[in-house]
Image (cartoon, coloured by chain):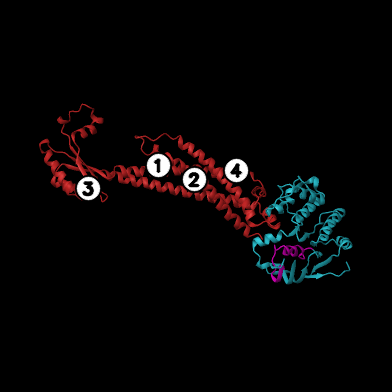
Amino acid sequence: MDHAASARVVPPTGFTARLTLVTAAAMAFLAVFALALSLATDRLATRWSDALARSATVRITAPAEEMDTRLDSVMKVLGETPGIRTFRALDDSEMDALLQPWFGADLPLDALPLPRLVELNESAQGIDAKGLQLRLDAEAPGAVLDDHTRWRRPLVAAAERMRFLGILSLLLIGGAMAGMITLAAQAALAANVQVIRTLRLIGAQDRFIALAFVRRFTGRGLAGAAAGTALGMIAVAFLPAANDAGGFLTGLGFSGAGWLWPLFIPVLAGIVAYGATQMAAMRMLKGIR
Amino acid sequence: MIELQNVAIGYSGHDLISEMSLRLVPGSFHFLTGPSGAGKTSFLKMCYAEMLPTAGQMALFGRDVHSINRDERAMMRQRIGVVHQDCQFLDHLSVAENVALPLTVSGRSVHGQELRELLSWVGLRSQADALPPELSGGERQRAALARAVMMSPDILLADEPTGNLDWEMSLRLLTLLVELNRMGKTVVIATHDMNLIRQAKAQVSARVLRISGHRLQLAGADL
C-alpha cells in the first residue's frame, strides 16, 4: 500500500496536532522522572537490604577485670544461638580503625574503658533478636545486641513502596497517554467523518482509512514522546550527582545501563498511540457502510 | 450486474420503495425519474450497497448483498463509479489528486499520462492543480465524473449530475456519459430533467425507470 498517499487523505489539522505532540511530550517527560524514581529506589532498597541488613553487633560493657569472662560468656551464648552464621570479636586494631575518625590517630586505646564489640552475621534463617538479648542479659550482664535490621527494615520497606509507586506512576502515565491519544484521534475522526464516507464510497477498505489516521497519530505520539524523553533525560542528567552523604534525594537518576531504560518510553508511546488510534478508527468505521 | 427480486428499501421500518424486480445488464442505459423524495437517491445508494434491501433478494455482481463483508463491499465499489449530487471531494487535495483517489485508495499507482487524458476528456486539464472549492458547479460535476470513471468501472451511477448545470454544460456531461455507455459501461442516471432524457434517447437506447407510489416502474416509450 502506498503509505505516503494514505497519509495525504487526512486533512492537515494544526491545533490538535500540536496538542497531541505537546501532551505526548509532557507525558514522556513525567515518565522519565517516574522511571528515574523507580530505578533509584530500586537501587536504594537493594543496597540497604543487602549490605548491612544481615549483620549485627554485640556491645559488651564491663569493668576491665571482668571483660574477658564476659566476652567468653557472650561468645558461648552466640555459639549456641541458632540463626548466626559467623561471629567474632573485633581486635584492638579494628577498634582503633573504627574510632580513629572520631578521636584521631594517637588514641591511647589501652587507657580507655572501651566496650568490646562482637560482630555477627546472620544466616538466611535470621536470629530471634529478643530471645538473644534475654539470654545475654542472663549470662553476660552489660552485653547489648545492636540489631541493624531493626532500623533498616522500615527504610527498606519505604524504598520498596517508593519503587512500587514509581511503577504505578509509569502505568498511570501510559494509561493517561492512551486515553489522551484516543480522545485526539476520536476528535480527528469525527471532524473528518465526511472524508471517511467519501473514501468508503470510492472503494477504500477499512485498513487503508484506519492506516491514514493511525500513521498520523502514531507519528505524533512517537515524536512528542521522543522530545519529552530527551528533555527529561537532560533534566535528570543535570541533577546533582549522588554522593555518600547525599542519601536518597540526590540519588535520583540513572546509572550505567539504566540510561537505556528511558529510551523505551517513545517506543511504548508509539505502540500505545498505534493501539489507541486503531481501536478508535475501527469503532468509527463500524458506523459507516 | 445488479439483480433485484421483490426488493424493498426504506428507513426505520418504513418502506420507501417496495416490490422492485429488475435486472441491470451490462451495457444498458437507464434513467431514473420520479418526484423529489420518491427515493431516487436511496435507489442509487442501494446499487452501491450503502443501503441494504429490507426485503427481497438483491445480487450485486452475482453476490447476495447481505453476504458481502466490508472489504468485499469496498472491492465492489471499485467496480462502481458514482457521481454524487454534491460530488464529495476531499477539499484539501487538488482536482487531479481527487480524480486519482480511487486508484490511491486501492493501492494502485497513478499514471500521469492517463490522468491527464482523463482530465482533458472532461475539459479540466488546466484546473488539475486547483482545489475543489475553487471550481464552478459544472467543473465539479465533470471532476466527479472523471473520478467515477478513473477505475474503469463496470457500472456508472449518477445522481442528478446536471442539477446545477446550464443546458449547454448538461449536454456536454450527457455526451460524456453516452460515450462511456458506448464503451460498454452500464449507466444509471437519476434525474428529473425530461429534456435531458429526450436528448439522450436521440443518442442511445435508454430506458426510463420511474418511481411513483412507492413502486419502481419501467416507463413507456412515450417520453
Label 2, on which residue?
A: A264
The C terminus of chain B - image quarter:
bottom right
The amino acid beneath tag 2 is Phe
Check residue B42 for magenta coloring.
yes
Q: Nearer the viewer, residue B107 or B145?
A: B107
How far from the left and from the top, in percent, is residue B214?
A: 76, 70
Crowd band around label 2 with a 10 angstrom C-alpha radius: few (<14), some (14–19), many (20+): few
CB within 8 Å, label 2 to label 4: no
Report helix, strand or loop for mark 3.
Answer: strand
> Distance from label 1 to label 3 (Cα)?
31 Å
Q: Which disc is residue A18 wearing?
A: 4
Report helix, strand or loop for mark 2.
Answer: helix
Q: Identify the mark nearer the N-term, 1 or 2.
A: 1
Q: Which chain is cyan?
A: B
- Chain hosting mark 1: A
> Distance from label 4 to label 3 (Cα)?
63 Å
The region drawn magenta spans: B36-59
- Chain hosting mark 2: A
Check residue B114 for magenta coloring.
no
Q: Nearer the viewer, residue A39 or A162?
A: A39
The amino acid beneath tag 4 is Arg
Report the mark closest to the observer, 1 or 3.
3
How far from the left and from the top, in percent, is residue B217?
A: 80, 70
